[in-house]
Image (tube, rainbow, N blue to C red):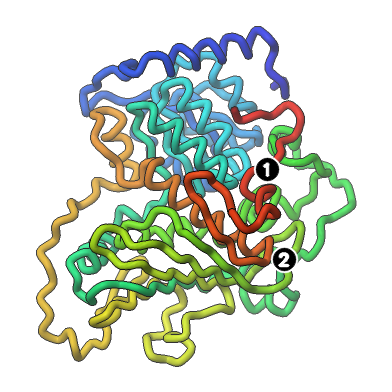
């Protein structure tokens, strides 16, 4: 496939996008039993899992920079058209209704925005974008449409999170002023000994200088997309090796933060922090850290008080954990309220201290059971029903996660003006809020 679009193709794509945005009522009603025509952008790795999640619909297009990934997916979806460059897909936008984006993090926004501009429902793998500015662009673009959007935070659909949200929002532990989130995964920049102990999938401390031939069928230039050019090396692919490199990802914070910070964001109705500070090892210009910590300050929301949320990654743990005041779970979320604590992970939760809650009467469930994370999105595409991880919600969550990395990289507590998307006390943060793109790539 050509790496650049012809002038004619660009004009066709731009015209179709303009028509879609100019017509707010373009989404036709569908019978809930009618199948969607779905285009898949990113068919290997997480893309294969996401494809499986929507496979009951009509899969009409398969796109991946890796030809073997497309061919593998095509074994089951034999009638689907095949693409290498997702921009080519949008030359014939009338052939599909919805798009599933599962590319690497650094190209999420590009594929997602094209889909929104062409009036296509979008499911995008987490994190929604590569940086704060991109998250703002996507959230605002989605808000102008009536499209069904969903970020791939699959655990959001499970019952356990729903029960925790109900408990926190009905005051089971009283007003919450402190939250700790920690994940045991420690992948990224660290010593060889630490990498082995932490079961990292790769040990690397600097960008390789040698030029290695890409695997057969991988279009390396398209894989790089808007990121700075560099020679291929197996330290970048397959995924998730790439997520530790700042040019392509944002480490564990943006990856697992999408899942674990989701719970306090939902339960405490969080949106934008007013300040963020971070600490850990000396920032590396190329690589995200295996271990780090970020402290967020959120203002009061309605009848909820101001709250401090601390993210602990790898070797960092909450004081309640290190002092063994709570069970030693490998990953978790701890809500500290005026009247007790609630400890949760993906599948279970505890009210602490347990003796205090022996006779506690849990509220009757009031958050509806999910149809399933993919099913919820498919249903929304067909009926206009809401989704729970739509781009409005997911956009704010993504911005916040990225802000923790920005604070880490500049090594300074940031005073954050969300409206202006500016760290008011730190101009050095600007390059990490919005990046420059490689020639030939432009988001807006």
For the point 37% across and 86% down, which residue is it? 326
Precedes in sequence: disc 2 or disc 1: 2
The N terminus appears in which quarter of the rendering? Answer: top right
Q: Secondary structure at mark 1?
A: loop
- Residue 131 disc label: none
Residue at the spot x=31%, y=35% of the render?
378
**Numbered disc 2: secondary structure:** loop
- Horizontal side, residue 355 vs residue 403: left or right: left
Q: Is residue 203 left or right of residue 272?
A: right
Locate residue 249, reporting x and y percent. 63, 51
The residue drawn where x is 60% and y is 44% is 104
Q: Hey, which quadrant is residue 339 in on the image? A: bottom left
Q: Is residue 334 above or below residue 105?
A: below
Q: Nearer the viewer, residue 313 or 98?
A: 313
Furthest toward the top, the residue is: 8
Q: Residues within 10 Å of mark 1 (few under 14, many from 20)?
A: some
> What residue is drawn where x is 29% and y is 77%?
337
The answer to the question of whether label 2 and label 1 lie on touching residues, with beta carbons closer than 8 A, is no
User: Residue 192 location, x and y as percent?
Assistant: 75, 75
Disc 2 to disc 1, C-alpha distance = 18 Å
Q: Quadrant of residue 34?
A: top left
Residue 318 picture location, percent across and down: 47, 81
Which residue is identified by label 2? 283
Q: Where is mark 1, residue-wise?
A: 435
């Amino acid at each position: 496939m050509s790496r650049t679009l012809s002038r004619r193709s660009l004009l066709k794509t731009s015209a179709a996008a303009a028509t879609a945005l100019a017509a707010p009522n373009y989404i036709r009603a569908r019978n809930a039993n009618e199948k969607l025509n779905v285009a898949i952008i990113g068919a290997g790795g997480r893309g294969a899992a996401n494809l499986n999640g929507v496979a009951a619909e009509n899969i009409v297009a398969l796109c991946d920079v890796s030809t073997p990934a497309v061919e593998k997916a095509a074994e089951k979806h034999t009638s689907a058209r095949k693409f290498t460059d997702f921009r080519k897909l949008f030359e014939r936008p009338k052939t599909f209704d919805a798009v599933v984006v599962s590319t690497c993090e650094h190209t999420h926004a590009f594929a997602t925005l094209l889909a929104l501009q062409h009036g296509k429902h979008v499911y995008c793998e987490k994190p929604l974008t590569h940086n704060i500015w991109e998250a703002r662009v996507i959230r605002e673009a989605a808000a102008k449409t009536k499209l069904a959007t969903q970020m791939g935070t699959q655990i959001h659909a499970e019952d356990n999170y729903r029960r925790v949200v109900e408990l926190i929002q009905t005051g089971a532990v009283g007003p919450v002023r402190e939250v700790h989130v920690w994940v045991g995964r420690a992948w990224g920049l660290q010593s060889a000994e630490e990498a082995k102990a932490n079961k990292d999938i790769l040990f690397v401390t600097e960008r390789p200088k040698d030029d290695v031939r890409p695997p057969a069928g991988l279009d390396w230039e398209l894989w790089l997309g808007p990121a700075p050019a560099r020679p291929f090396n197996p330290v970048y692919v397959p995924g998730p090796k790439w997520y530790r490199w700042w040019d392509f990802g944002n480490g564990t914070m943006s990856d697992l933060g999408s899942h674990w910070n989701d719970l306090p964001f939902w339960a405490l109705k969080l949106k934008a922090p007013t300040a963020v500070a971070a600490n850990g090892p000396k920032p590396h210009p190329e690589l995200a850290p295996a271990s780090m910590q970020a402290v967020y300050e959120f203002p009061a929301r309605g009848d909820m008080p101001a709250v401090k949320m601390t993210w602990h990654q790898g070797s960092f743990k909450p004081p309640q954990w290190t002092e063994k005041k709570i069970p030693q779970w490998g990953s978790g979320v701890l809500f500290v309220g005026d009247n007790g604590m609630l400890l949760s992970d993906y599948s279970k939760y505890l009210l602490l201290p347990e003796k205090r809650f022996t006779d506690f009467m849990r509220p009757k469930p009031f958050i509806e059971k999910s149809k399933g994370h993919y099913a919820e999105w498919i249903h929304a595409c067909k009926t206009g029903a809401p989704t729970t991880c739509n781009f409005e919600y997911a956009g704010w969550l993504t911005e916040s996660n990225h802000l923790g990395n920005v604070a880490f990289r500049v090594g300074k507590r940031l005073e954050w003006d969300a409206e202006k998307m500016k760290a008011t006390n730190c101009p050095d943060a600007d390059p990490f809020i919005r990046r420059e793109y490689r020639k030939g790539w432009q988001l807006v």
